[in-house]
Amino acid sequence: MAVLVQDPIQEAILQVAERIQASYEKGAPCGMILAPCAAVNQKVLENMQSYMSGFEPDIPLHCFYLDQSGLLGIVLSGQKLINTHYASLVLKEFLEQQDLLEGQMAVASFPESGELTEQSLSQLLYMSLQGKGESRDIHLFMNHGLQQGITSILIADPDEVSREFVKLRLEINGYKVEEAKDGSEALEKFEKTMPSLVITELNLPILDGYQLIDKIKRDYAGEGQVIVLTDKQLPKSMDRAFELGASDYVTKPFSISELEWRIKKLISRVG
């Protein structure tokens, strides 16, 4: 992978490419985590590798720190996206304990996240650098063409496990996903990002799901579809949600494959 060093970004691409190539086995997946961090020395890298190995002793890790760009990187040889994402959760916990994380983390696994090229590495690096100083979220990098019609999704659910599960599956399919833990945060993020689709629980703190749907449909008519994903199974709850403008209604416990199918149905309508 020939890279011409012209600026700090290009130099970072070269450094990341060298480290990936050192661990990459042809035909095998290769996981990659990048995180904007405060200065990290060799001792911290060793402690981090030991900490992560305590959770996943069988996953080979190669850790490094790019001083010039302030990025921490981890290469996980032979690991698919789901295992790389799990490793990023462990890494995030360590970095937050050490007060080192300075922005959102970018997670990828090639070839699941796209072809491993200079362009894809450049996009991954820009995602990491642009996330510096922002929230400490974990974002999955996908270099595939996005689905037509619905490309961005906001998930509103107070249950963190449920949110992360749905978020991971949707990001693997190429969607850009935001999440909110209550109705007020969901409305704020909706106004900021204008997602194509909102997936919301009805039992939301502060502003409930009904109020969220009503606000979206009244104030932003035509700007977003809404799928209700809830444990409310009474017919009157469903009727009220549809009256307020929901496009679909899925009850918990649910099949993620069914939810993906419901989203594709909406794509066919708005595409």
Image: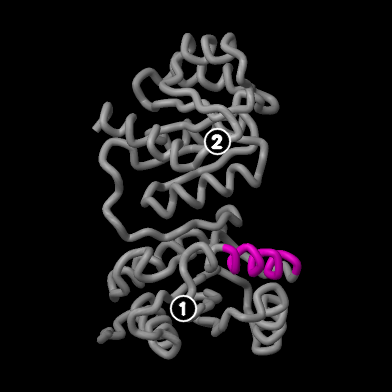
Vertical relation: 131 (above or below) 30? above
- Compute the Cα span from label 1 to label 2: 31 Å
Query: Residue at left 26%, top 31%?
Result: 268
Image spot of residue 147 (x, y percent) = 29, 44
Instruction: Tell me, yes or no, whether the two marked residues, 1 and 2, touch with CB atoms within 8 Å.
Output: no
Circle 1 crowding by C-alpha within 10 Å: few under 14, some 14–19, many from 20: many
Q: Amino acid at mark 1?
A: Gly
Q: x, y (%) of residue 189?
A: 52, 36
Residue 254 is tagged as 2
Which mark, residue 143? none
Task: Please rate how many residues cluster around mark 2, counting C-alpha atoms within 10 Å: few if below 14, some from 14 to 19, many from 20.
Answer: few
Dot 1: what SS? loop
Looking at the picture, does residue 107 appear above or below residue 183?
Answer: below
Q: Is residue 80 above or below residue 54?
A: above
* Residue at 43% from the left image edge and 62% from the top image edge: 127
Kind of residue indicated by mark 2: Phe
Q: Nearer the viewer, residue 163 or 13?
A: 163
Which residue range is magenta in the image?
Answer: 86-97
Q: Quadrant of the N terminus?
A: bottom left
Q: What residue do we see at 61% from left, 35% from top?
A: 157
Q: Which residue is mark 1?
A: 78
N-terminal label among 1 and 2: 1
